[in-house]
Each structure stands twice: as structure tokens, then as C-alpha cells.
Image (cartoon, rainbow, N blue to C red):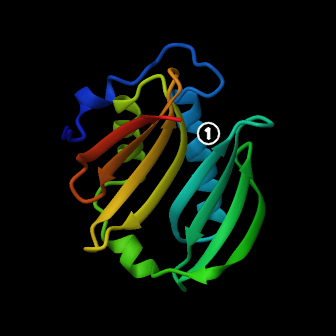
Amino acid sequence: MRHSITTAALSVLVVSPLSAAEFGPEVDRAIEQCLDAARRDQVGQVTRWDLEWTTGLAFNLELVSPNDRVWNMRCEGGVIVKSERKAANKKYEMLSTRHRVEEHEARQLAGAEYAGGELHRMTYDLSWRGQPYYNYSFNLPDGRTATVLVNAVTGVIDKTSSERK
């Protein structure tokens, strides 16, 4: 099923009070705060974030800097509490110049696809053909896990899938 990013799709998001883990405006705001904090700490392209709900809402992020170095960061309460260089290199220029759709827009579209689901991971990478994608992972209320693949050039959901754990 293919979707493009439109205001109609964005309006599908749940705006009712949230449970602790359900994706909605509060979780979205927390993600943005941590992404902003990561970019203030280190200039670069965020290529992964994972949400943790064990001791409140916290994030582990991966960011590729313009010198192609990879940084792991931990964000709690909108503040980077840990930042360390990872023993890996990725191509910043390839990752930062190929997408036309911002991650926030892709996240809204993916969240609308599985409203009521717990969004717990985003990865941004290139396919074997060099096509950039945002890959979102959800835990659903009925016990399934779901994946949404958003094309970072077109803003279209290219693939969704779900399966029992």
C-alpha cells in the first residue's frame, strides 16, 4: 500500500491522551527534543534512534558527522547525557544529500499507519541501489511487531509488514 505525505495523512494521528508508550504528540515532541540536543552536541545526520521505556523515556542515537565518524549518544529528558565515538565510519555526504523528505515527516506518516502502536526504533540507511529509506519499528497492542519503510526521496510508504512475536 503506497501513501504520500499529505495533511490528510498527518491528521490521522491519535491526539487523545496517551499511554506511556503509544506514539503520539508527547512522544513525538520528546523525539524532537533529543534529536535537537544531539545536533547541538555534534553536527551530523542521525541514522538511528531507539526509544527506551525502562526508566522513563530515554533515547539511544547514532549520528554520522561531516568527517564520516559515527557517534553514539544517550538522551534523557531532552539532554545528551553520554556521547562517545563508535568504532565505525559511514559516508556522511551520501547519507545527508540523498533524502528530500525530513525524518519528522516520515515519522508522522509511519505513525499514522500503525496508530496506537509503540514506536521504538528508526533507522536511516541506503538500499543496495543507493535509495535512502527511513525504517520504523513498532510494537502493536495485539502483540505483533510492525515495520514501515518510508522512501526518503518520495515520501511514500513503500512497504509495511507485521508479524507475531
Side of 11 where 123 appears, left or right: right
Q: Residue furthest front?
A: 164
Residue 62: x and y in percent read 60, 64
Residue 38: x and y in percent read 63, 60
Above or below 86: residue 51:
above
At x 39%, y 36%, the residue is 162
Mark 1, Cα crowd under 10 Å, few <14 / some 14-19 / many 20+, is some
Residue 74: x and y in percent read 73, 56
Q: Residue furthest bottom?
A: 67
At x 30%, y 70%, the residue is 98
At x 48%, y 57%, the residue is 123
Q: Residue tagged by mark 1?
A: 30
Q: At label 1, which amino acid type do we have?
A: Ala
| Quarter of the rendering containing residue 4 | top left
Above or below 80: residue 71:
below
Above or below 26: residue 47:
below
